[in-house]
Amino acid sequence: MALKIRKNRAPKPLCPIGQCMTFLGMAWTSNIIWNLSAGARRFSELRHDIPAVSAKVLTQRLREMEERGVLTRRVMPTSPPSVEYELTELGREFMPVIQAIMDVGHRLKTRAEEAREAA
Amino acid sequence: MALKIRKNRAPKPLCPIGQCMTFLGMAWTSNIIWNLSAGARRFSELRHDIPAVSAKVLTQRLREMEERGVLTRRVMPTSPPSVEYELTELGREFMPVIQAIMDVGHRLKTRAEEAREAA
DNA sequence: CAGCATCCCACGGGATACTG
DNA sequence: CAGTATCCCGTGGGATGCTG
């Protein structure tokens, strides 16, 4: 007998956490969603919103998110060109997740600081 | 003038997404939380629950989570030794997040499959 | 403005082997 | 059982430079 697990009560219905986390886990993904939550935004505006992100990565994320149907990309026929990104219905479904993440993140941070002070 | 942002209505109250995502984004973190959600679990049980994780990484994650106060580590004075990991109050606060992530992840997956079929 | 193309490297994580 | 110690490698992502 290899291993006797106490119970099989681990809630393991093939939890597709990995699927989503490889997406959300990519740098800046959640941040982009967050910054688009209030409405459409242009490329340069997003760069301004998230100064630390490089153009390359921002483009990558936006492309991925477009493919996944999380946001739409609209090229405005102006000169110079400008491109608007906007969350789709699907994309907006992430908002509760982002919010929840932020809430817990804050608690986590507070907790870490308390621990450091105690030491 | 460097850049004229249309409005400052980006909901940017210093969103600490990064803080939390560097934590949740680490491989297996969410999976571990998920598998601990039903109660305490031993090291080997977790390895069994998540076959793809290596002992090294599992240990790393558990240590980090312990430091952050997300779970507790209890060494049972038995022979051979066994160690129990259990979510703390703080750790349990992640459950809604994980659940939300899973839900959206599923929709995202479905969406991706539809897109592939259409092509 | 909104991007691709390239180069480069830190580091997260897998594999393997060993210990109290 | 529950780890620790090494080695090694893929890749995500930053920096820089060029274009339609």
Image (tube, coloured by chain):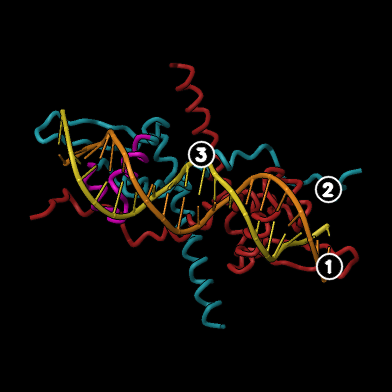
Chain colours: A red, B cyan, C yellow, D orange
> Which chain does the residue under circle 3 lie in?
A
Q: Relative to residue A56, is residue A73 depicted above or below?
A: below
Q: Secondary structure at mark 2?
A: loop
What amino acid is labelled 2 in the image? Answer: Lys
Residue drawn at x 76%, y 68% is: A74
In what quadrant of the picture does the N terminus of chain B appear? Answer: top right
Residue placed at 52% from the left, 28% from the top? Answer: A110
Residue at coordinates 49% horizontally, 68% vertically from top-left? B109
Camera-near label (2 vs 1) is 1
Identify which residue, B24 or C1, lies in the foreground: C1
Q: Main secondary structure of the magenta part?
A: helix
Residues marked 2 and 3, same chain: no
First to last magenta residue range: B42-63
Residue B5 position in % (x across, y down): 84, 48
Disc 3: which residue: A104
- First along the sequence among labels 1 and 3: 1
The reply, left or right, for residue B61 in relation to residue D1 is right
Chain at numbered mark 2: B
What's under tag 3, amino acid-wise? Val
Q: Relative to B118, does residue A89 appear above or below in the rendering?
A: above
Mark 2 surroundings within 10 Å by alpha-carbon count, few (fewer than 14), some (14 through 19), many (20 or more): few
* Disc number placed over residue A76 in the picture, else none: 1
Q: Residues within 10 Å of mark 3 (few under 14, many from 20)?
A: many
Which residue is under mark 2? B7
Indicate the position of residue D13 as horizontal and vertical percent values. Answer: 59, 49
